[in-house]
């Protein structure tokens, strides 16, 4: 009896449904060279997340300068989509995936061709004005928004804490930091998208950060099945009908190839 490949139960689960929604975390992008947060060597093993709260960013120019240096490190490598992102986009193009709810800020799902992407934690590809003194946790900018390259150009000109050209407010990446509220309407968009799913495929997330991690759990409460692809156990494994312990790029590309290739 030939050994069953780890991805085969996932291919079977994907083949049994018509409406898949993918829920992704940083682990789907590690094979693009972007470190995740909580694995060994992850971002929060090298930086203290408490140093990067919204309140500290607003209060301290030194925190903002360190944050820009960290973002520079992040974007220096020009990350590209990997086979896991491409497999997700392939599923959507084939009409089998309704879209992606991602916790990631790297824009790699869109770069891979995914069209319907809800970015729960915003995007680091753009920067926004958050105003002079935003209230606790809520950006209150003038509406200025620009590609992240605008900020890097200002920094290269020697402005290590770039301010808004329209109102002199604080500028921040268009991401959601600890202590910051999600952007208006995003969680609702995620709940609506997840509500369309027969199956939610959670990929590369430790499923520890709320409210994001409640999105796949809410889908199960709503009657969807849950499949998880992750390098290590997650708190939602017991809710899943399929759990694949493995690397996202290889597992997703093989499972999607199998489910989209008609049986001969
Ligand atoms: N294939 C499969 N799983 C992987 C891979 C991979 N190539 N690389 C890493 N993983 C797994 C890790 O084992 C880990 O369980 O992905 C998970 C990533 O978990 P986290 O680092 O906690 O990232 P994430 O779940 O996205 O974090 C959620 O926390 O700090 C906040 O805003 C940040 O969006 C982030 C949120």
Image (spheres, rainbow, N blue to C red):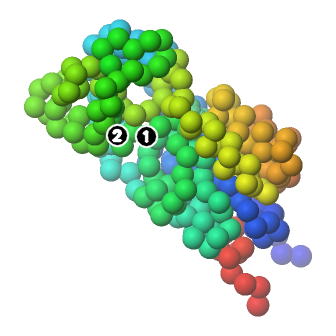
List the single residue furthest toward the left. Answer: 157
Q: Would you identify the image quadrant in which residue 25 lies?
A: top right
Total numbered labels placed on residues in the image = 2
List the single residue furthest toward the top. Answer: 59
Do tag 1 and tag 2 residues touch (Cβ < 8 Å)? Answer: yes
Q: Is mark 1 within 8 Å of ligand 1?
A: no
Looking at the picture, how far across and down is residue 217, in whole percent?
78, 39
Q: Residue at x 79, y 57 (%)?
A: 198
Label 2 SS: strand
Q: Residues within 10 Å of mark 2 (few under 14, many from 20)?
A: some
Looking at the picture, how far across and down is residue 138, in whole percent?
47, 19
Q: Which residue in the protein does label 2 denote?
A: 126
Q: Nearer the viewer, residue 93 or 144?
A: 144
Q: Nearer the viewer, residue 236 or 230?
A: 236
Looking at the picture, how far across and down is residue 235, in whole percent?
77, 34
How far apart in space, not on screen, are marks 1 and 2 (Cα)? 6 Å
Q: Residues within 10 Å of mark 1 (few under 14, many from 20)?
A: some
Quadrant of the frame with the C terminus: bottom right
Say if 114 sits above or below 103 in the image: below
Ligand 1's image quarter is top right
Left or right? Give the position of 212 relative to 19: left
* Mark linked to residue 123: 1
């Amino acid at each position: 009896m030939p050994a069953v490949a780890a991805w085969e139960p996932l291919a079977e689960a994907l083949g049994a449904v018509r409406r898949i929604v993918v829920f992704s975390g940083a682990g789907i992008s590690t094979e693009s060279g972007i470190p995740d947060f909580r694995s060994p060597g992850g971002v929060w093993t090298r930086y203290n997340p408490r140093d990067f709260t919204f309140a500290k960013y607003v209060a301290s120019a030194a925190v903002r300068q360190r944050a820009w240096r960290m973002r520079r490190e992040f974007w220096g490598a020009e990350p590209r989509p990997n086979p896991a992102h491409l497999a997700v986009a392939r599923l959507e193009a084939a009409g089998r995936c309704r879209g992606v709810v991602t916790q990631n800020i790297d824009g790699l799902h869109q770069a891979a061709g995914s069209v319907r992407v809800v970015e729960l934690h915003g995007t680091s590809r753009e920067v926004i004005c958050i105003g002079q003194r935003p209230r606790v946790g809520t950006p209150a900018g003038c509406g200025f928004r620009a590609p992240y390259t605008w900020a890097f150009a200002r920094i290269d000109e020697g402005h290590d804490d770039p301010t808004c050209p329209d109102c002199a407010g604080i500028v921040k990446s268009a991401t959601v930091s600890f202590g910051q509220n999600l952007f208006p309407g995003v969680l609702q968009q995620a709940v609506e998208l997840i509500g369309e799913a027969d199956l939610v495929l959670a990929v590369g997330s430790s499923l520890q950060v709320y409210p994001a991690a409640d999105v796949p759990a809410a889908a199960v409460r709503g009657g969807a099945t849950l499949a998880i692809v992750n390098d290590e156990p997650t708190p939602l494994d017991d809710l899943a009908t399929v759990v694949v312990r493995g690397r996202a790029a290889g597992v997703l590309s093989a499972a999607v190839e199998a489910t989209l290739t008609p049986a001969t």
